[in-house]
Amino acid sequence: FLISFTLVHNLKRPYKANETTSNMKFITAILAITAGSAAAFAPSTSSRMATSLKAAPEIEALPGALAPVGYFDPLGLSEGKTLKEVLKWRESEVTHGRVAMLAVLGFLVGEAVEGSSFLFDASIKGPAIDHLQQVPTGFFTILTLFIGFSELYRASLGWVSPSDPGFTTFGQLRDGYVPGDIGFDPLGLKPDDLEEYEILQTKELQNGRLAMLAAMGFIAQELVNHKGILENLN
């Protein structure tokens, strides 16, 4: 929805002659985003679509899809893949979805409080895509270390260590590890019931996928006219 709105708004806006190239770049970016998301939806046991490209039953049984789309893999990326290979992709998808949800929130909040005195002495200005290079070096260093330690913790929890006897390749997930379940649940939202847990996983995946599309749409729009998302919406 966010990308569709941005695309329509962008195309309706009157353009000067020297803006034609930027407009074409924006359309190309949106088309690439849409095409790249075609295989993002993971399998589900309900409302599956009949296709000529079939994944293994245990892959189709993974949470992550909603009716009426159901099992959606038009490019056949999961065909012939093992469950462990697909779970590795799911780990990446969950992680990128979480980052994207934070990014979308950061875009909107960062631009909404732009110029506020409590935000680096009101020194951060312009669209959100320009904010990171404006932050002080100390903050950027702390952010880099935080991301690094977080990734090391996730890897140590879910990935097989090269020193372990069962290690075969980098990025290999541990047996029994659920992609994205790193034990971080300060609000106690994780249910004990397996069916409810899978429903919660599906909700997170769907919101993460939408956030990835939204973040890419935000970036594409701001690259086109170098205006903030809130400014574009207004």
Image (spheres, rainbow, N blue to C red):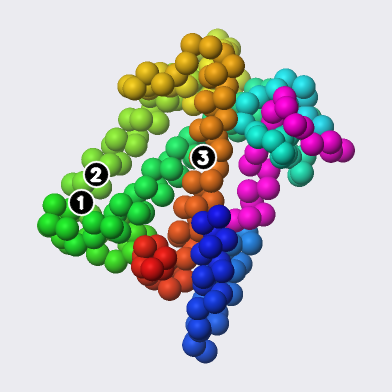
Q: Using a 10 Å C-alpha cutoff, classify the residue at mark 3 as few (fewer than 14 neighbours), some (14 to 19) or many (20 or more).
A: some
Q: Amino acid type of disc 1?
A: Thr
Dot 1 and dot 2 residues touching (CB under 8 Å) = yes
- For the record, the magenta segment spans 33-53
**Is 9 located above or below residue 147 in the figure?**
below
Residue 234 location (% of width, % of height) = 38, 68
Residue sitting at x 19%, y 62%:
115
Answer yes or no: is residue 52 visible. Answer: yes
The residue that label 2 is drawn on is: 141
Residue at point 39%, 27% (across, down): 152
Tell me if mark 2 has few (under 14), some (14-19) or many (20+) residues whose alpha carbon lies within 10 angstroms of its own: few
What kind of residue is marked 3?
Answer: Asn
Tags 3 and 1 in contact by the CB under 8 Å rule?
no
Badge 2 amino acid: Thr
Q: Are marks 3 and 2 in contact (CB under 8 Å)?
A: no
Q: From the image, give the main secondary structure of the stretch colored magenta.
A: loop
Residues under labels 3 and 2: Cα distance? Answer: 30 Å
